[in-house]
Image (cartoon, rainbow, N blue to C red):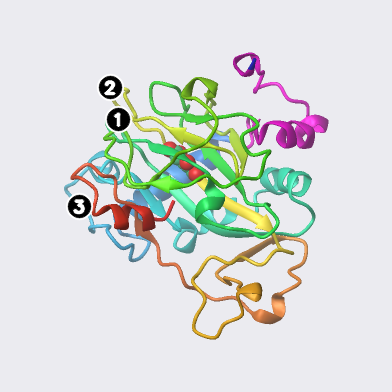
């Protein structure tokens, strides 16, 4: 029975086996309280507009408190492009150690997302990250760094253990469910909500999860506070990253989005160079209603 799965006490020697079997892995105490405090301070700096321009961030006035400012935003995409400490989390030693075990020696990153998710904010409906960020070797791996204790009350992750195994990408549709933000929802998959388990973790833990794993989060129903998490996405450097539409005449087989950071090992495609393409931006929370279904389907994860 999935509900009996012990997710908190996995021996380091079992990381790879557990991840392969279940599609996720919890590593407690990966980030120290000091490292988390720095990331909290960076969250404030980003939301105040002090780190640089972020599409959708309104520069804060000095008389607004940090709480007033940060609770405005559900999630900021690509914070690592403006914050050195957030960039450094991509290459955090504990993260790299685990990524080398579950992906391989050569790893690159293409995305970061900073969830602030204050009380009252929505979650994100069922989805698979590879639906949004396709790799060619199924190596996409999220590293979800808990910046607060994540509980069922404040909207922790829920996962369907083993749902990554068949390597199927399920379709997505727009939804009208106000529990969730404006990203679409996966459907037509052979699992029920009851197959999911909550991934409740302490601050400083990292939840690693496979890009084919079905997962979601529910709204933050706590009476105050946040459920902050910094989520970085990684993949094997050997795989191209076809994360953009082909331009006219472009060979589909060699599409490779080069807005990446090499995290460890070697990049066999380094001769292609790197580019800065994705701008930091705020994710629509859906509180004022979502845009059209078509816009919902194109909302980045
Ligand atoms: O943290 C959340 O609420 C959702 C995160 C998520 O689904 C993801 O990173 O893919």
The relative height of residue 149 versus residue 252 in the rendered view (above or below) is above
Q: Position of residue 206 (x, y in %)?
A: 60, 36
* N-term-proximal mark, 2 vs 1: 1
Q: Which residue is tagged 2?
A: 223
Tell me if I can see residue 229 in this picture: no
Left or right placement of residue 60 versus residue 253 in this view = left
Which of the two marks, 1 or 3, is nearer to us in this view?
1
Quadrant in which residue 160 is drawn: top right
Q: How far from the left and from the top, in percent, is residue 16? A: 77, 37
Q: Residues within 10 Å of mark 1 (few under 14, many from 20)?
A: some
Is residue 144 or residue 217 the one in the foreground?
A: 217
Does residue 240 appear in the picture of this structure?
A: yes
Is label 2 in contact with label 1 (beta carbons under 8 Å)? yes
Determine whether the residue tagged by mark 2 lies in a helix, strand or loop: loop
Residue at position x 36%, y 59% in the image: 281
Is disc 3 in contact with disc 2, using a CB cutoff of under 8 Å? no
Task: Identify the residue under disc 3.
Answer: 62
Comparing labels 3 and 2, the label whose residue is closer to the camera = 2
Residue extent of the magenta highlight? 2-31
Q: Would residue 296 be counted in the magenta stretch? A: no
Q: What residue lies at 20% left-to-right and 52% top-to-bottom? A: 62
Q: CA distance from mark 2 to mark 1?
A: 6 Å
Q: Looking at the image, is mark 3 or mark 2 earlier in the sequence?
A: 3
Residue linked to disc 1: 119
């Amino acid at each position: 029975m999935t509900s009996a799965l012990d997710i908190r006490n996995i021996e380091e020697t079992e990381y790879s086996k557990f991840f392969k079997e279940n599609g996720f892995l919890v590593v407690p105490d990966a980030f120290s309280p000091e490292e988390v405090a720095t990331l909290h301070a960076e969250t404030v700096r980003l939301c105040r507009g002090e780190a640089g321009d972020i599409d959708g961030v309104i520069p804060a006035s000095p008389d607004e408190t940090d709480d007033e400012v940060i609770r405005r935003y559900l999630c900021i995409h690509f914070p690592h492009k403006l914050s050195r400490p957030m960039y450094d989390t991509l290459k955090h030693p504990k993260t790299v150690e685990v990524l080398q075990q579950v992906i391989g020696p050569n790893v690159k990153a293409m995305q970061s997302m900073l969830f602030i998710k204050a009380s009252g904010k929505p979650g994100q409906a069922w989805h698979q990250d590879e639906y949004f960020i396709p790799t060619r070797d199924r190596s996409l791996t999220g590293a979800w760094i808990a910046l607060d204790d994540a509980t069922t009350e404040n909207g922790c992750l829920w996962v369907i253990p083993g749902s990554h195994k068949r390597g199927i990408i399920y379709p997505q549709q727009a939804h009208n469910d106000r529990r969730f933000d404006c990203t679409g929802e996966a459907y037509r998959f052979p699992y029920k909500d009851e197959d999911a388990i909550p991934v409740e973790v302490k601050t400083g833990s990292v939840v690693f999860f496979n890009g084919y794993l079905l997962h979601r989060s529910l709204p933050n129903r706590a009476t105050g506070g946040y459920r902050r998490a910094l989520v970085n996405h990684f993949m094997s450097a050997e795989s191209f990253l076809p994360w953009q539409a082909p331009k006219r005449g472009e060979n589909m087989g060699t599409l490779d989005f080069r807005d990446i950071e090499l995290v460890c090992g070697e990049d066999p495609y380094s001769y292609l160079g790197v580019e800065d393409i994705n701008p930091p931006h705020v994710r629509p929370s859906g509180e004022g209603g979502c845009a059209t279904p078509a816009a919902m389907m194109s909302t980045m994860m």
